[in-house]
Image (tube, grey):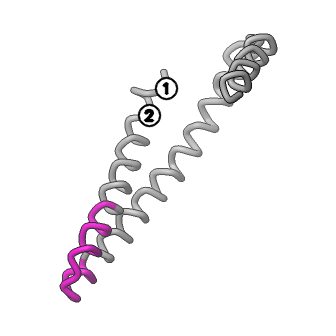
Amino acid sequence: MIFMVVLCLVILLGITAAPVFAGGNQGQAKINTAIGLMAGWIAKIGLVVAFFGGIETVLAFASDNAEARIKGLKIMAAGFILYGIVHNINDFIP
């Protein structure tokens, strides 16, 4: 049953897929501007997440809570990874 649903969705997507082109370089410039704006905000959010993870890690060291330390370090790493990916966005989106 699940296979049939997935198969129907794949066929439906294959039938309805159509290429869409932007009008010259003007459309590409608008898309690049929008991506740049979003990337800036996502980078800032990544730094806020990393800062929150750092604060949580410091508080976990103060209370000697090993589980909270790991959680804080994971949150901090996720924030820095997000920040790093956004700053190298040109490697991912040509």
Image spot of residue 43 (x, y percent): 45, 51
| Residue at x-position 23% and y-position 88% | 63
Q: Residues within 10 Å of mark 1 (few under 14, many from 20)?
A: few
Numbered label attached to residue 37: none
Q: Residues within 10 Å of mark 2 (few under 14, many from 20)?
A: few
**Figure check: 55 above or below 20:** below
Residue type pointed to by label 1: Ile
Q: Are marks 1 and 2 in contact (CB under 8 Å)?
A: yes
Q: Quadrant of residue 70?
A: bottom left
Image spot of residue 16 (x, y percent): 81, 15
Q: Is residue 61 left or right of residue 14?
A: left
Quadrant placement of the N terminus: top right
Q: Is residue 55 magenta?
A: no
Q: Is residue 4 left or right of residue 34?
A: right
**Figure check: 48 above or below 26:** below
Q: Quadrant of residue 54?
A: bottom left
Numbered label attached to residue 89: 2
Image spot of residue 28 (x, y percent): 65, 22
Q: Is residue 51 left or right of residue 40?
A: left
Q: Quadrant of residue 73?
A: bottom left
**Figure check: 82 above or below 6:** below
Give the number of callouts. Answer: 2
Image spot of residue 38 (x, y percent): 58, 45
Q: Secondary structure at mark 1?
A: loop
Which residue bears the numbered disc 1?
A: 93
Of the pair 4 and 87, the residue shown nearer to us? 4
Q: For the view shown, which residue lies furthest in the front direction?
A: 1
Of the pair 80 and 4, the residue shown nearer to us? 4
| Residue at x-position 48% and y-position 59% | 45
**Figure check: 70 above or below 38:** below
